[in-house]
Image (cartoon, rainbow, N blue to C red):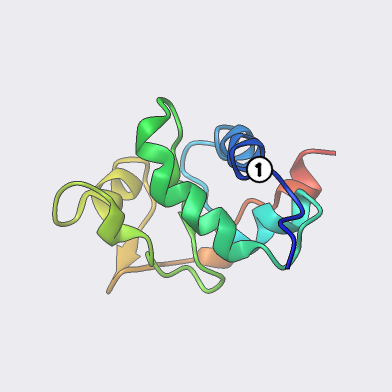
Amino acid sequence: MTNIFNKSDFFNKVYSIVSKIPYGRVTTYGAIANYLGSKKSARVVGWAMNASHITEGVPAHRVVNRIGLLTGKKHFFGINLMKQLLESEGVKVENDQVVNFKNIFWDPSLELQ
């Protein structure tokens, strides 16, 4: 199977989108992949988020799974850093899941037209 995109270019596109997520809002791996025209690449978006610590200014804590779970939390330094960062922005999190997920969901396909 041929790699259809350059991983570093794709990661940089992901970081560009993630940097636009407003304070106090969240989006999903799939929403980012869909916006970038690569609907089936949510997992690659996740890989980009896992590697985002090497790129300054990427608010990776604002990216969660499709139902609002903090599935990327293990890639943050500290025990509950992802949760703490979200809560510092006013996002309520219970049992590693964003409360009112649908109300604070930010869809780049709608917001970045």
Q: Residue 112 location in percent, x, y?
A: 78, 38
Task: Name the residue furthest front.
Answer: 1
Question: Dot 1: what SS?
Answer: helix
Quarter of the image where the C terminus is located: top right
- Residue that appears at 71% across and 56% down: 3
Residue type indicated by callout 1: Phe
Residue 28 in view in this figure = no
Q: Identify the image quadrant of residue 30.
A: bottom right
Is 54 positioned to the left or the right of 95 in the image?
right
- Residue that appears at 66% across and 62% down: 41
Is 35 positioned to the left or the right of 92 in the image?
right
Q: Residue 99 location in percent, x, y?
A: 42, 67
- Residue that appears at 50% across and 58% down: 46
Quarter of the image where the N terminus is located: bottom right
Q: How many C-alpha atoms fall within 10 Å of the one at disc 1: few (<14), some, or many (≥20)?
A: some
Q: Identify the image quadrant of residue 93.
A: bottom left
**Residue marked by disc 1:** 10
